């Protein structure tokens, strides 16, 4: 399950997830998020979730879906917080695939929400 909350900073939206996230769930949420009009910074808090069932191909497909939605997204930075080694590794893979696809969103993976917030709060001019 993925939910959103805008309580950290008016420029940051927090997406909290818990449980096992599947590709169909993530795919449907990406479309919802594009329509939601989020601010320029998003913190994806996956500390209580796992994406360990996702394949490399599904991660690439998520990047492609975001690429198709990019004109409706105002997000400039996205921080993914994951605690498990597999989840953190998949978050880093997503970041790398986003960079390779030349998405205009900077994506970075973190182990703690504090370091993710610090990174999100820097560079508001980009």
Image (spheres, rainbow, N blue to C red):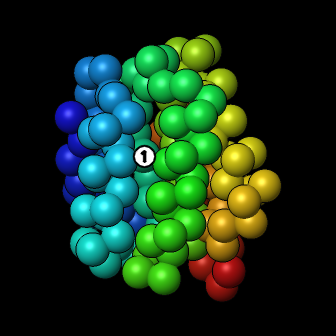
Mark 1 Cα-neighbour bin, 10 Å: few <14, some 14–19, many ≥20: many
Residue found at the far right of this picture: 100
Residue 25, position as x, y percentages in the image: 28, 39
Q: Nearer the viewer, residue 66 or 115?
A: 66
Is residue 47 rendered to the left or right of residue 54?
left
For the N terminus, the quadrant is top left
Tell me if I can see residue 110 in this picture: no
Determine the image quadrant of residue 50.
Answer: top left
Q: Height in image: 43 above or below 39? A: above
Residue at horizontal 50 percent and vertical 48 percent from the top: 62
Where disc 1 sits, the SS reads strand
- State whether residue 59 appears in this view: yes
Q: Going by the image, does 31 lie left or right of 57? A: left
Residue at image coords 35%, 47%: 27
54 and 46: which one is in front? 54
Q: Which residue matches tag 1?
A: 44
Q: Position of residue 86 (x, y in %)?
A: 58, 16
Report the number of discs. Answer: 1
User: Relative to 38, is 57 above or below?
Assistant: above
Give the quarter of the image for residue 118: bottom right
Residue 69 at x, y percent in the picture: 45, 71
Quadrant where the image shows the C terminus: bottom right
In screen coordinates, is 78 left or right of 53?
A: right
Q: Indicate the position of residue 42 as horizontal and vertical percent values.
A: 44, 60
Residue depicted at 55% across the width and 25% down the height: 55
Residue shown at 68%/36% (left/top)?
93
């Amino acid at each position: 399950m993925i939910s959103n909350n805008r309580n950290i900073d008016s420029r940051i939206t927090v997406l909290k997830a818990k449980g096992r996230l599947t590709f169909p769930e993530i795919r449907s949420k990406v479309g919802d998020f594009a329509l939601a009009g989020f601010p320029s910074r998003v913190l994806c808090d996956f500390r209580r979730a796992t994406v360990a069932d996702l394949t490399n191909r599904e991660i690439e497909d998520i990047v492609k879906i975001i690429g198709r939605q990019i004109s409706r997204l105002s997000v400039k930075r996205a921080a993914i917080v994951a605690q498990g080694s597999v989840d953190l590794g998949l978050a880093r893979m997503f970041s790398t695939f986003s960079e390779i696809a030349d998405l205009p969103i900077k994506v970075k993976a973190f182990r703690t929400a504090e370091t993710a917030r610090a990174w999100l709060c820097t560079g508001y001019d980009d």
